[in-house]
Amino acid sequence: MKRYIALFRGINVGGKNIIPMKDLGRVLEVLGFTNVESYIQSGNVAFNAAGRTRAQAAVIRDAVLKSHGVDAHVILME
C-alpha cells in the first residue's frame, strides 16, 4: 500500500463549501482507504491505498458530491 495525499480544491474556503474534516475522512474510509488522517480544516487528507489511478480521484470527488453536495476538484499526490 502506498501513502497518498488528497488535496480538495474549493472546500472550507471563505466560509463556503464547509465540510468538517471528520466527515471528509469518513467518506474516504467508506471508499475503502485506510489510515485516513486530515490536517486541520484545510481540505487536505492523507490515506493509504493500493495503487494510484485517475479513477480514484474521480471516485473521491463523486463521493464528496453525493455525501455533502460539494463538487470539489481532487488532486492526488504520492
Image (cartoon, rainbow, N blue to C red):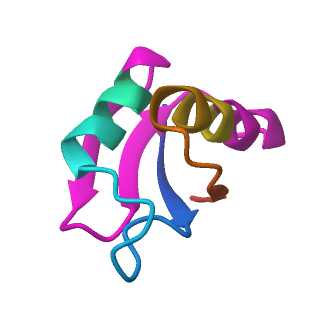
At horizontal 60% and vertical 37% (from top left) the residue drawn is 65
For this view, does 71 lie left or right of residue 17? Answer: right
Q: Residue 75 lies in what quarter of the image?
A: bottom right
Q: Residue 9 lies in what quarter of the image?
A: bottom right
At horizontal 32% and vertical 71% (from top left) the residue drawn is 42
User: Which quarter of the rendered picture does the C terminus lie within?
Assistant: bottom right
Q: Is residue 38 above or below residue 64?
A: below
At horizontal 33% and vertical 75% (from top left) the residue drawn is 15
How many numbered callouts? Answer: 0
Q: Which residues are magenta?
A: 30-59
> Quick check: is 41 in the magenta stretch?
yes
Q: Is residue 59 above or below residue 21?
A: above
Residue 41 percent coordinates (x, y): 23, 67
At horizontal 37% and vertical 68% (from top left) the residue drawn is 12
> Quick check: is 7 in the magenta stretch?
no
Camera-side residue of 4 and 43: 43
Residue 24 percent coordinates (x, y): 35, 41
Q: Is residue 32 above or below residue 43?
A: above
The residue sitting at the bottom extreme is 14
Camera-side residue of 26 and 13: 13
Residue 51 percent coordinates (x, y): 66, 32
Camera-side residue of 16 and 64: 16
For this view, does 72 lie left or right of residue 28? Answer: right
Residue 33 percent coordinates (x, y): 43, 26
The residue sitting at the right extreme is 54
